[in-house]
Image (cartoon, rainbow, N blue to C red):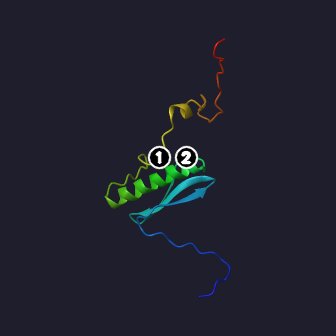
Amino acid sequence: MKSNGTRRHRKAKTGSVTIRSSNNRPQLVFTHAGKRHFVSLGLSNTPLNMKTAQETAFEVQRDIQYGEFDPTYRKYKIHPTASATMCIGANGHWRSPSFDVRLVGD
């Protein structure tokens, strides 16, 4: 087979979950019950977040194998921590966190 210079992606096996970068954010891609699923985790593309995405991918794959897949994706979404929640403004938009700096001993 000759290569014509184009790159072909192999299809993943049914039930396997792959991670791809979409808008510089990890996204889980998989097929379940004949439907293609794209789950954005709401994380930036950092090494720590990629590890979290890989763990979530394993969880999704395991749930598919055991028949426990959550089609609402609630189980697989990353829930914000209290500090991240504090960065959501009153209008619901993301804002930079402000810090209250206090000197110790003064």
Q: Is residue 86 left or right of residue 66?
A: right
Are the residues tagged 1 and 2 within 8 Å (C-beta)? yes
Q: Give coordinates of residue 106: x percent, y percent.
A: 66, 11
The residue lying furthest to the top in this view is: 106
**Front residue of this view, candidates 99 and 31:** 99
Amino acid at the residue labelled 1 = Lys
**Percent x, y for residue 7?**
63, 75
Determine the residue positioned at 50% across, 49% down.
52
* Secondary structure under the numbered disc 1 in the rendered image: loop
C-alpha separation, residue under disc 1 versus residue under disc 2: 8 Å
- Give the mark nearer the N terminus: 1 vs 2: 2
Instruction: Tell me, for residue 48, which label it has, or none.
Output: none
Query: Residue placed at 51% from the left, 38% from the top?
Result: 80
What amino acid does circle 2 point to?
Gly
Residue at x 59%, y 57% (from the top left corner): 21
Residue that numbered label 2 is attached to: 42
Q: Residue at x 54, y 32 (%)?
A: 85
Residue located beneath label 1 in the image: 77
Number of marks in the image? 2
Residue placed furthest toward the bottom: 1
Q: Is residue 68 left or right of residue 41?
A: left
Q: Secondary structure at mark 2?
A: loop
Depth check, front residue: 50 or 25: 50
- Quarter of the image for residue 97 reads top right
Q: Position of residue 75 (x, y in %)?
A: 41, 47
- Seen from the viewer's position, the closer of residues 45 and 72 is 45
Q: Quadrant of the N terminus?
A: bottom right
How many residues crowd mark 2 within 10 Å: few (<14), some (14–19), many (20+)?
Answer: some
Q: How far across and down, in percent of the image, does residue 90 sit?
A: 59, 28
